[in-house]
Image (tube, rainbow, N blue to C red):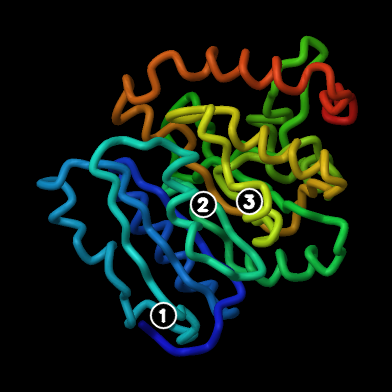
């Protein structure tokens, strides 16, 4: 415990074993905690022997809390793999904060993230805010071109597939810097109003281990009249698919199964709109 001030943000981070990235992820949260926050790290059934070397990541690190604003730190463990939605729901369950931040362990937020979210959320019509994400500048993977765009919102293409437009574009391209309403934003990093998340019951467990539950959540918010906002002035770096690289069989056939579930649920609602702006 750090202090007794009520937190404004509750940040949930789930990890499936990329402890090297989890450390960078948590360091960035501590560094940007200019508002009182609480942190919950959910260990999704990682190997206990491997975790031992990173024990410090599952405890409050006072020396890193430079603003003395981390109100509480909680560590939870799933003994069997629960996946994305269930892990984040568990980490968020006890939170009563105004804002809930969902954060992958392979994302490092930029300084000013929480301040930027607070400014955006002054517009009461916005239910979820997403951020501009880049691939890490040190990336050597052809699938993650160094310093290029990874996320600027998630629209649908003309075939009804959810896509990442402008992926691989230069980060200084003006089109990637336009803040705008979006169909959806990635669950790798988003902040949602806490009361909305709680009223919806969190992520839908129908999506199992993962994929599409973040889009489903965004459309549920839109269905209730909330807006999904992509804010280009806040951001981070995303080492996308790093967990899948370490555990290639972790999600099985979930992507295609969940895509069919998602389309069956939303196809007749009129909310699946092709977004021509992004192309």
Task: Report the residue that reaches farthest toward the bottom.
Answer: 4
| Of pointers 2 and 1, the one earlier in the residue sequence | 1
Q: Residue at x 77, y 29 (%)?
A: 155
> Under tag 3, what secondary structure?
strand
Q: Earlier in the sequence, mark 3 or mark 2?
A: 2
From the viewer's side, name the closer residue of 247 and 143.
247
| First in residue order: circle 3 vs circle 1 | 1
Residue 225: x and y in percent read: 87, 46
Residue designated by label 1: 65
Q: CB of mark 2 within 8 Å of CB of mark 1? A: no
At numbered mark 2, what does the secondary structure look like: helix, strand or loop?
A: strand
Mark 2 residue crowding within 10 angstroms, few (<14) / some (14–19) / many (20+):
many
Local crowd size for mark 3, using a 10 Å CA cut-off: few (<14), some (14–19), many (≥20): many
Q: Is residue 48 above or below residue 151?
A: below
Q: Which residue is mark 2?
A: 103
Would residue 65 be found to the left or right of residue 116 on screen? left
Quarter occupied by residue 160: top right
Q: Is residue 139 left or right of residue 180?
A: left
Give me the C-alpha separation between circle 3 and circle 1.
22 Å
In the image, taking residue 34 as reference, residue 15 lies left or right, namely: left
Q: Secondary structure at mark 1?
A: loop
Q: Residue furthest left?
A: 49
Q: CA distance from mark 3 to mark 2?
A: 7 Å
Give residue 278's position: percent from left, percent from top: 83, 29
Mark 1 neighbour density, 10 Å: few (under 14) some (14–19) many (20 or more):
some
**What residue is at 86 percent from the left and 63 percent from the top?**
124
- Quarter holding the C terminus is top right
Residue 171 location (% of width, % of height): 69, 43
Quickly name the residue at label 3: 190
Q: For the point 71% across and 64% down, which residue is it?
A: 117
């Amino acid at each position: 415990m750090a202090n007794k001030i009520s937190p404004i943000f509750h940040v949930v981070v789930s990890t499936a074993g990329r402890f090297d990235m989890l450390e960078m992820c948590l360091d960035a949260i501590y560094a940007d905690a200019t508002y009182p926050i609480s942190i919950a790290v959910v260990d999704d059934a990682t190997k206990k022997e491997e975790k031992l070397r990173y024990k410090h990541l599952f405890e409050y690190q006072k020396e890193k809390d430079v603003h003395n604003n981390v109100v509480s730190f909680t560590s939870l463990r799933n003994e069997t793999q629960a996946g994305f939605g269930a892990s984040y729901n568990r980490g968020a369950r006890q939170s009563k904060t105004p804002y809930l931040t969902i954060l992958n362990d392979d994302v490092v937020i930029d300084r000013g993230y929480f301040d930027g979210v607070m400014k955006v959320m002054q517009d009461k019509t916005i239910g979820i805010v997403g951020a501009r994400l880049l691939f890490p500048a040190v990336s050597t993977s052809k699938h993650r071109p160094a310093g290029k765009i990874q996320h600027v919102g998630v629209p649908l293409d003309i075939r009804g597939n959810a896509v990442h437009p402008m992926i691989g574009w230069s980060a200084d391209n003006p089109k990637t810097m336009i803040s705008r309403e979006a169909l959806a934003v990635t669950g790798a990093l988003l902040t949602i109003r806490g009361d909305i998340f709680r009223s919806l019951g969190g992520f839908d467990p129908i999506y199992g281990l993962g994929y599409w539950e973040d889009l489903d959540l965004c459309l549920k918010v839109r269905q209730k009249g909330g807006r999904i906002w992509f804010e280009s002035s806040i951001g981070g770096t995303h080492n996308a698919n790093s967990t899948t690289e370490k555990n290639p069989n972790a999600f099985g056939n979930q992507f295609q199964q969940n895509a069919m579930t998602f389309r069956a649920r939303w196809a007749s609602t009129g909310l699946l709109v092709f977004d021509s702006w992004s192309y």
